[in-house]
Amino acid sequence: MDAATPISGITAVMLGVRDVPAALAFYRDKLGLKVIMQESALALLQCGAVMLGLSRGHAQSAPHIAGATEVVFRVENVRAAHRALTAQGISFLGEPRQATPTDWVAHFRDVDGHLLSVFGPEGAA
């Protein structure tokens, strides 16, 4: 890495949410992310090496809650993740599809309309 660019990775992704408890229920109960910290206006969840923040303050400071952003969750089997999340009540925007020569993707939205996806090998149909 160039010495003029001291960035070494992404620590967190912050999403503006209207209702922290509702968003937290989605990410914790449906996606299975571990809660690190929770307050009335902010929750932090662990997602691998990156924290996912759910922030009411971010939502209040922006004219639109969801924009041209996508949070991509790495999975080992897209079809199995699609089945498991569907069983949790998540509605996907379409069937899993091939995105690269080696990886597949399936898109869905959270309770605030943020675009999310599971991404990885296809897995068994």
Image (cartoon, rainbow, N blue to C red):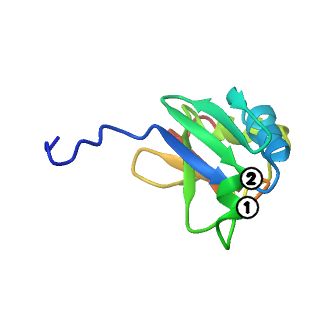
Q: Residue at coordinates 65% horizontally, 65% vertically from top-left?
A: 61
Residue furthest bottom as drawn: 63
Type of amino acid under label 1: Gly
The one nearer the camera, 46 or 3, is: 3
**Residue 21 numbered tag:** none
Separation (CA) of disc 2 from disc 1: 5 Å
Q: Residue at coordinates 69% horizontally, 60% vertically from top-left?
A: 59
Would residue 75 appear left or right of 84 to someone viewing this image? left
Q: Quadrant of residue 18?
A: bottom right
Q: Position of residue 123 (x, y in %)?
A: 57, 35
Q: Judge whether residue 107 can be spotted in this image.
A: no
Characterize the local packing of mark 2: few (<14), some (14-19) or many (20 or more) Cα atoms within 10 angstroms.
some
Q: Position of residue 55 (x, y in %)?
A: 68, 49
Question: Element under label 1?
Answer: loop
Q: Residue under label 2, please give it.
A: 110
Pick the quarter of the image with the N terminus: top left
Q: Quadrant of residue 76?
A: top right
Q: Residue under label 1, please give it.
A: 113
